[in-house]
Every structure is written in structure tokens, then in C-alpha cells.
Image: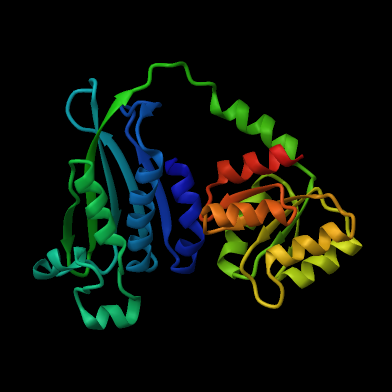
Amino acid sequence: MLSDVRSTNRFKADEHQNTINLNIDENVPDLVLGDSLRLGQLMNNLVSNAIKFTSNGDININISVVGESQDPTYVKFSVVDNGIGIEKENIEKIFERFTQANSNITREHGGSGLGLAIIKKLLVLMDADIHVESVFGKGSNFYFTLPFVKDNSLPIPEKSIESNENVLLEGIKVLLVEDIKFNVLVAKKMMENWKIDIDLAENGLVAVEKVKNNNYDVILMDLQMPIMDGLSATKKIREMGINTHIIALTASVSNDTQSEVYSCGMNNYLTKPFNPKDLHEAIRRAI
């Protein structure tokens, strides 16, 4: 899960000439029982915020066990940067909704928006809290501790799974239909790691033309796009008698959206932002 957090934020880090490092203490259990969705939200928000306020620096994701390694195991998560830091009198302000610590910094870097307020609220609901150590001009350390019950089931070695499954995807042809450049970069990088042959279309109309003239194994179709949206494009493709597996990329998981996705002829959907494992699994199932 933490590797996915690093992968998801790597492109934004590159824009700021930052490096993301993942440091996991050897005492941290391989498998624990917990809420990976909420923990992913917490870590993605913290890493994203660290990147925003750091340039030409390092973002360190540090994971360690607090105290004796027992059940439950208390795991400390920290995100440390060497960015602009926070003045001591402004630390409490950063957790208020849309309240910024310094207006000059906000103009240059953008504000933290709802991110830190959401982190604090989620941790309170988990009977925990977010802590900050910061030196203005030198960097910040955001950290929290959560208890986990260890899962003692035997894990399957990850490397062998990854290498075998990546071979399954090598050489297949995927059409990625997406108009937002950052989303294209993220998805493209994921698929390049699996040696997938990727073609791009910036809207539904371009996608329809490309499908007419090329054979694809899978189509990844964003729903909201200018000129022609994903639902309309899918209907056109199906009217042409083309049965290529189409996976919707959507920010909404409402019942109405799901109904529209399937009724227009799509085969599956992924909720954005998706992680590499979900995308890999969706494409693998499609082929």
C-alpha cells in the first residue's frame, strides 16, 4: 500500500525536483488487519502536502513499531520533508479548514486546502491524532501512531507474483482515453512498467476514430471529457460492432453512474484515483 502511495505521488514530486524515499523498519509486520483505504487517504494527503511545500528536496515516508512488537502492534507513520517548514505560532492553524498559516506562502505554493483538516478528522475517528514538528525554513515532520492486529497467515512471495503477472500484460495494446495530462502521466507510467503498448486519445471523438483504424486489447475510457464524453464514445464504438473490453475511469461510484457505465456497453469501471494493483487487476481480468 505504501509503495502505491509513493508511485501515485512520484510524478508530482518530479515536477518539484523532489525524491520520495520509503523507509520501513524491519520490526514492522508484513501483514496487518486494518483499513487500507483510510490509511491510504492519510498517507496520500501527507505526502502530497509535503511535495507541495518542498522543492529540490527529499520526502521521507518512515514506518516503525513503537515499543515492543506485540498484539496489537503500534505502528508509527511519519512523513518528513526538508521544505519551507512552519512557524511555531502557525502550526495549529494549518489544521483548520481552508485557513492558511501565511498568505505569502499560500500565493507561492498554494494552500493545504482541506487535506490536513481531513487527516485530523480521520485520525480522531480512529482514536488517534496527528502531530507536527517543524522548523521554519528547514522542514516538517508530520506523524501519527495506529494500533494493528497482526495477520499471521503466510504471505505469497510478492516478487514471483509480480514478475509472473507482468509477463501476462507484456505486449498487449491499450487505448487510454483521458483529457487531463496528469492522469495520463500517472496511468501511462504504471502501464509502461508492465511493458504494455499504450496509445492515447484526448477525448471520445478521437478515441472512436482510433478504434476504427486500430485493434486494441483493452480501452480505458474516462467519462468526463470535452467534445465527446466517454459514455457517448462507448455507444459509438459498440454501434460499430466492436466488442473490445472497455473499462470506465470515473470519480463517481454512485448507483446512477454504475448503471450508465454498464448500460452504454462498458464492461467494468475503476474509481479515480486508482492504485497500480487495481489497474493491473482490471486489465488482467479484461484479457
Which quadrant: the C terminus?
A: top right
Front residue (pair 138, 92): 92
Residue at 22% x, 40% y is: 145
* 95, above or below 225, in the image: above
- Residue 167 as seen in the image, left or right of residue 61: right
- Residue 169 as seen in the image, left or right of residue 57: right
Residue at 70% x, 37% y is: 285
Front residue (pair 66, 93): 93
Residue at 61% x, 28% y is: 161
Across and down, in percent, residue 87 comes to 14, 70
- Residue 113 as seen in the image, left or right of residue 193: left
- Total marks in image: 0
Across and down, in percent, residue 250 comes to 57, 58
Residue ranking furthest to the left = 89
Residue at 73% x, 41% y is: 286
Indicate the quadrant where residue 126 lies. Answer: top left
Indicate the quadrant where residue 103 lies. Answer: bottom left
Instruction: Give the colour scheme shown.
Output: rainbow
Indicate the quadrant where residue 98 lies. Answer: bottom left
Across and down, in percent, residue 149 comes to 29, 24
* 30, above or below 270, in the image: above
Across and down, in percent, residue 171 comes to 80, 45
* 44, above or below 88, in the image: above
Which quadrant: the N terminus?
A: top left
* 164, above or below 8, in the image: above
Front residue (pair 185, 61): 185
